[in-house]
Image (cartoon, grey):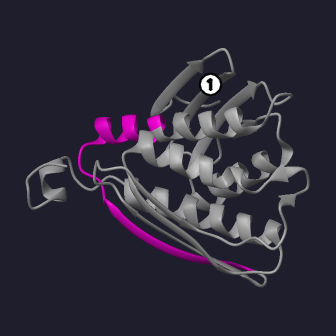
Amino acid sequence: MKGKPDSSIKRDTKETRITAELYFTEPGIRQIETTLPFFNHLLEAMTFHGGFGLVLKAEGDTDVDPHHLVEDTGLVLGQLFDDFFGKSGGVTRFSHKVIPMDEALAEVTIDICGRPTCVYLADYPQNTAGTFDLTLIREFLLALTQKGRLSLHAEIRRGDNGHHMAEALFKALGKALFEAFSPRGNDASAMSTKGTI
């Protein structure tokens, strides 16, 4: 039986309907349901290897274009982590992770600085993984960065298989999110020489 989530968000628009709960220290709580199978796969890899729990249900107008669902899921996840940060006080703040998957190698660096910045470098040899448009990963990361108020640098250094490349990236993202948001004392003023983020 799951306990109380560390953060929960509900987002309803004319385009998407999303509910999400973050269980930061309960990695066994994982239930991810979107209408995009490969996106589910990426989010499951992110949470499993990140070591945190997530309950997510997302649906929307994918008959028009999956873009809205992927972007809005990024917005919701960013809000989840930003809300968790607001409740937890001081966190580790920085993280840098490099993860391989077969021939692919991906790198993610995070700074919880309150200034949304997203730098994303990837050159996929295929346009899709299954039926999933790999260009949507950029939209997800931009949205996550905006609502999470992060400086996020994500780079796929190399790879021949788009599936491997995207999955390595999400594994690195999960590990980086968990480390950066791991609580470190109760004093957020210790996170910056300015005394505040």
Which quadrant of the structure image shows residue 126? Answer: bottom right
Q: Position of residue 171 (x, y in %)?
A: 64, 64
Residue 186 lies in the magenta stretch: no
Element under disc 1: strand
Which quadrant of the structure image shows residue 165? Answer: bottom right
Residue wearing tag 1: 19
Observer-nearest of 145 and 9: 145
Position of 67 compared to 127: left or right? Answer: left
Q: Position of residue 131 (x, y in %)?
A: 90, 50
Observer-nearest of 114 and 64: 64
Q: What residue lies at 71% left-to-right and 55% top-to-bottom? A: 135
**Residue most extreme to the right:** 130
Q: Where is residue 34 in the image (x, y as percent from the top left)?
A: 77, 35
- What amino acid is found at the position of numbered circle 1 in the picture? Thr
Q: What residue lies at 56% left-to-right and 61% top-to-bottom? A: 173
Relative to 57, say whether 187 is above or below: below
Q: What residue lies at 75% left-to-right and 81% top-to-bottom? A: 159
Q: Position of residue 71 (x, y in %)?
A: 62, 39
Residue 93 lies in the magenta stretch: yes
Where does the magenta region start and end? 79-101
Q: Quadrant of the N terminus?
A: top right
Relative to 145, say whether 11 is above or below: above
Decide if residue 187 is in sight here.
no
Position of 187 compared to 38: left or right? Answer: left
Disc 1 crowd rating (10 Å Cα; few below 14, some 14-19, many 20+) is: some
**Residue most extreme to the left:** 194
Q: How many marks?
A: 1
Which quadrant of the structure image shows residue 194? Answer: bottom left
